[in-house]
Amino acid sequence: MIAASEHATGGLRALAQEIGGRRGRHYHALADKIERGERVEAIPMAQPRSVARLTRFAILERGRGTTRRHLIVVCALGFFYLLSSLTVGCFVLRTTGPFALEFMEELDVAYETRMASWASHEFFTTAYVVAIVALIVTAILFVIRIMPRSPGWIERLWDRVPMIGPTLRAKELAEMAESIYQSLVGGRNYPEAFAVARQSTPSTRLHRWLGDAQARSESGASLAAIANTLPGRGEFIGGVLATLASTPTEAASVDLWRETSVRMHQLMQTRGQRLRTVLAPTLVVASLLIASFALIQSMGTLYQVIEFISN
């Protein structure tokens, strides 16, 4: 942030020569102190462009963190509601079933009638137990998915889950696009930008693709050819890479990546908002319907017992 030199002292002296005056002499003195190994205070100065880049990076990083937290909260509450409703429904079914069968035996109800009623009740009880096991397995897979570098097959599996998969994918692609933009605007070339993004991405598939993209770009492969191997549905990033070959200048290429990052973050925020406004209420309603169905099924069985008693 001081100058283009790789060394702090060289950068300070270059900046001092450019500025001159008292502040320039101050930077020369700081360079001398650094070379002598003396402790110096932080320099209260930064280039405005660097500050703007840092501010932009911090804002976008906070947006990605917020979307990730909202996703985790919505899914955690959804798993809790569904698991609670399935557990309550299973408990109700397993309680009323044996009770109703015992009453039918005491009332000498026909064996075929008792078995038909019991088979229907047992079917729904088994279905609830299977749903509980499937939900627990799904919750475990979700925890693995949101962890950095989860297995690729789990990422592909969650890509097919409505709303949740697209939101995770948009967040990871937005993070990759911003990392590439920050690298390019900092003066790095594409192989270096791919390497930086590869180290920062939490996605296993993007990590592998960025490593391959780095190797292929170093060997002279075109960005259009690299874009064809982008895993999953890469939103419009694949199209961006394909059109970079016709970009007239390096500045235009950097501007294109900045706009791509902005669009991907907007898409991520839109999908995160959809999680809160659509998915969360849907999961709550579904949990209520699951518990209500078990209660209605149990009441129907008990109603049959009451009918036999009245007859």
Image (cartoon, rainbow, N blue to C red):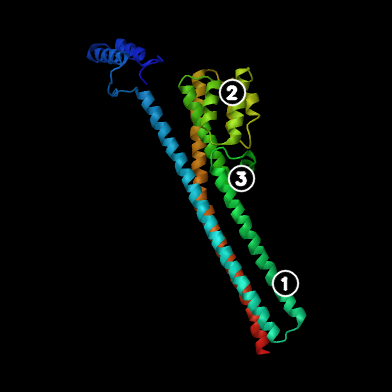
Looking at the image, the residue that sits furthest to the left is 22
Disc 3 to disc 1: CB gap under 8 Å:
no
Give, as a three-letter code, the residue at label 3. Answer: Trp
- For the point 60% across and 56% down, the residue is 135
Circle 3 crowding by C-alpha within 10 Å: few under 14, some 14–19, many from 20: some
Q: Nearer the viewer, residue 79 or 66?
A: 79
Q: Is residue 275 left or right of residue 45?
A: right
Residue 73 in percent (x, y) is at 48, 51
Q: In the rendered image, which residue does mark 2 sit on? A: 214
Q: In the rendered image, which residue does mark 3 sit on? A: 158
Residue 74 in percent (x, y) is at 50, 52
Q: Earlier in the sequence, mark 3 or mark 1?
A: 1
Q: In the rendered image, which residue does mark 1 sit on? A: 119
Find residue 28 and name its label.
none
Circle 1 crowding by C-alpha within 10 Å: few under 14, some 14–19, many from 20: few
In which quadrant is the N terminus drawn? top left
In which quadrant is the C terminus drawn? bottom right
**Residue 208 occupies which quadrant of the picture?**
top right
- C-alpha gap between disc 3 and disc 1: 35 Å
Q: Nearer the viewer, mark 3 or mark 1?
A: 1
Give, as a three-letter code, the residue at label 2. Answer: Gln
